[in-house]
Image (cartoon, rainbow, N blue to C red):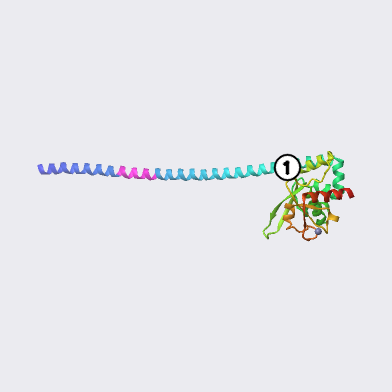
Amino acid sequence: MFIYLRSENNIGDFLKGRAASKSTAHSKKVKRQENKVNAAKASRKKALAKAKAKISIEAKKKAKELEKKRLERQQKREQAKKVLEAINTVLANDAFVEYIHTNVGRYGVEVMKRLTVPKTDDALANELNVKVNEVRRVLNLLSGYGITKYDTEKDSKGWLTFHWYVDVEKLLEFNSNISTKKEEAGIGLPEDCDDFFVCEKCFDYNKVVLPFDVAFEHSFKCPDCGKPLKRLSKEEAKSLLLAKEKVI
Ligand SMILES: [Zn+2]
């Protein structure tokens, strides 16, 4: 009996103990599940945050690009406005118009008017409906005065495209030189250049004196006929242009 009771007690203890350990096991299981759920939640949250961060980086990048493009467009518009204003200023000066007409030809002014944004010689030739060689002659003449300049762009085949534009500062400087009738009025050879080049064959016809960088771009060959150019000092270039003016 005693034994029985003891064992009954033992059984009770055993059952209690089993129940307790069962409940511990159960709560451990629940805890593990909770942990699993929490970990999954945390990982989803992390992934979401990462995705959001990525989106925000991309959005910022895109916004930055758009802003850059907007600024570029604005700069282009402002530059075009500046060129247009300068061209209107010089075209109001009869002496300037006459000078360009006499020394560059009848397309001189027309070419300038169309260069409020950079253009290629082909585009200008199309707009004016004249031969591209005539446009090139005008552009080279104007570049001799420092009025036109160009940027080059290489295409996939390695061909260079010249994008011509008006140097507003030089244009206005040239215009005021003509207005104030300085001795070398209108010659406008670039100040920062000491080497000039001329094609002896074409000068009588095209009146082009090329500054160093333009001659360099043409590999020191005449843009009109392809013959090697002759080098001139600044003084020689000036007297050549002055002599030309006296003839006219
Ligand atoms: Zn030539």
Which residue does the image show at 16% across and 43% down from the upper left?
A: 10
Q: Give percent across and percent down for residue 151.
A: 71, 51
Query: Which image quadrant shows ligand 1?
Result: bottom right
What secondary structure is found at the residue carrying circle 1? helix
Which residue does the image show at 66% across and 42% down from the upper left?
A: 71
Q: Main secondary structure of the magenta part?
A: helix
Residues shaded magenta: 26-37
Is residue 9 within the magenta segment?
no
Is residue 27 within the magenta segment?
yes
Task: Report the front residue among 93 and 16.
Answer: 93
Task: Report the front residue among 68 and 15.
Answer: 68
Could you classify mark 1 by the number of other residues whose Cα lies within 10 Å: few (under 14), some (14-19), or many (20 or more)?
Answer: some
Q: Give percent across and percent down for residue 115.
A: 77, 47
Q: Give percent across and percent down for residue 136.
A: 79, 54
**Residue corresponding to mark 1:** 79
Task: Report the front residue among 9 and 151.
Answer: 151
